[in-house]
Image: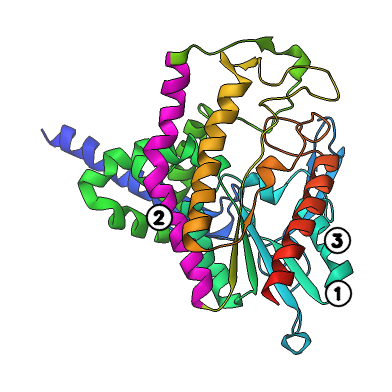
């Protein structure tokens, strides 16, 4: 009996000691670079990254810099300059991590806007993988103190299907823990424990990789051809219906937050490589290509349902809408996968955003 007790005590003591050592090590040096700790956003201030890729349409090495705010773009101007301040918020399609400084679409947009509005400051606050849940935390913790004149929300991609699966209340680890200490308890623990936060993020990242697309090159010519059955299409599209109310409410929250300091919230819809039309580069019918046994038309219809929620929210809330989803040409010259942009794509997107946003700004003046 004593031997069994001693072994159990030794195991528990060793585990506790290991966790304490890991906690200290992670506090001194975080090798993972995760950008959330519980419900707290952790921004990489003054960080520089060099990303090497062999993906078509991207630079061999992308040089990325995060400023004192943890965003991409120039440092905040002196208050005496009183610039027109604009911050772009979104996921990976906003952050554009594999494009060098000045090539991400918010930077391209800034260059074009400066022609009509010389005293303009634009920052890119995109965070890879974030949905509107993360945007709410980001606005509250990092953007609201800056009180920018305009916040552009480029949203939709990460709401389907990720919205059903990446939110903390549906995370598979969270499902096990919430019954023990509750949501607030878990978030508080992760806020203060680097070990728990790292474990949670690693497990979540592994899980998400199994259900979402990576930043991998897609060759539409190498894809097969498929046409979804009516039942498969209905089942796939039904995932959007399940998130409609929550997504709408989060948009309402974001719009209200920006308006609370007198800023202008602007919503934007998301385009997709797949959908009706012929790829001008390869001649492939982008509605019929097959990825994971699902045709391009159905994938586009699903995203369009999300975009329709964004459009409806913009009308209801009286927020300006940039309908980018209907403006950007479907072309493999612009996309290196289904949703992420080549340099040419980001350049076209930035010019498009600038043209659309210029009209909004002029109407406001």
Residue 353 tag number: none
Residue 220: x, y in percent? 75, 19
Residue 249 tag number: 2
Residue 241 falls left or right of residue 325:
left
Residue 167: x, y in percent? 41, 45
Residue 152: x, y in percent? 63, 60
Residue 126 falls left or right of residue 171:
right
Residue 17 on the magenta segment: no
Determine which residue is flagged by label 1.
Answer: 118
Q: Decide whether the magenta segment is chiefly helix, strand or loop.
A: helix
Counting other residues with Cα less than 10 Å from the Cα at mark 1, is it few (<14), some (14-19), or many (20 or more)?
Answer: few
- What are the residue bounds of the magenta stretch? 231-260
Comparing 9 with 356, the one in front is 356
Comparing 227 with 147, the one in front is 227
Residue 111: x, y in percent? 86, 62
Residue 340 falls left or right of residue 5:
right
Q: Secondary structure at mark 1?
A: loop
The quarter of the rendered structure image containing the N terminus is top left
Chain-order first, disc 2 or disc 3? 3
Q: Secondary structure at mark 3?
A: helix
Give the quarter of the image for residue 175. top left
Residue 287 falls left or right of residue 117:
left
Residue contact at pointers 3 and 1, CB within 8 angstroms: no
Q: Which residue appears farthest toward the bottom when viewing the image?
A: 80
Determine which residue is flagged by label 3.
Answer: 112
């Amino acid at each position: 009996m004593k031997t069994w007790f001693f072994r159990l005590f030794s195991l528990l003591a060793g585990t506790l000691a290991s966790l304490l050592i890991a906690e200290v090590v992670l506090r001194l040096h975080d090798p993972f670079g995760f950008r959330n700790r519980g419900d707290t956003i952790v921004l990489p201030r003054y960080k520089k990254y060099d990303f090497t890729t062999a993906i078509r349409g991207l630079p061999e090495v992308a040089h990325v810099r995060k400023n004192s705010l943890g965003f991409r773009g120039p440092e905040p101007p002196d208050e005496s300059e009183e610039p027109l301040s604009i911050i772009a918020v979104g996921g990976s399609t906003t952050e554009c991590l594999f494009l060098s400084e000045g090539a991400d679409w918010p930077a391209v947009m800034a260059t074009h806007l400066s022609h009509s509005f010389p005293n303009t400051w634009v920052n890119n606050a995109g965070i890879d993988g974030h949905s509107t849940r993360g945007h709410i935390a980001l606005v509250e913790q990092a953007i609201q103190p800056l009180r920018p004149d305009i916040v552009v929300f480029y949203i939709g991609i990460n709401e389907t299907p990720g919205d059903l699966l990446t939110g903390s209340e549906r995370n598979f680890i969270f499902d096990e823990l919430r019954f023990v200490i509750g949501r607030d308890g878990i978030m508080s623990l992760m806020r203060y424990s680097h070990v728990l936060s790292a474990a949670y993020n690693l497990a979540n990242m592994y899980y998400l990789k199994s259900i979402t697309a990576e930043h991998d090159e897609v060759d539409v010519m190498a894809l097969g051809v498929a046409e979804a059955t009516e039942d498969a299409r209905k089942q796939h599209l039904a995932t959007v219906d399940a998130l409609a109310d929550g997504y709408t409410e989060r948009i309402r929250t974001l719009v209200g937050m920006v308006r609370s300091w007198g800023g202008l919230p602007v919503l934007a819809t998301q385009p997709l490589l797949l959908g009706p039309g012929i790829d001008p580069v390869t001649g492939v019918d982008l509605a019929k290509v097959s990825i994971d046994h699902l045709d391009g038309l159905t994938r586009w219809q699903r995203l369009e349902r999300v975009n329709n929620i964004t459009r409806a929210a913009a009308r209801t809330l009286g927020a300006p809408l940039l309908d980018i989803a209907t403006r950007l040409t479907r072309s493999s010259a612009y996309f290196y996968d289904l949703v992420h942009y080549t340099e040419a794509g980001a350049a076209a997107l930035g010019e498009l955003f600038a043209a659309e946003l210029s009209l909004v700004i002029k109407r406001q003046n």
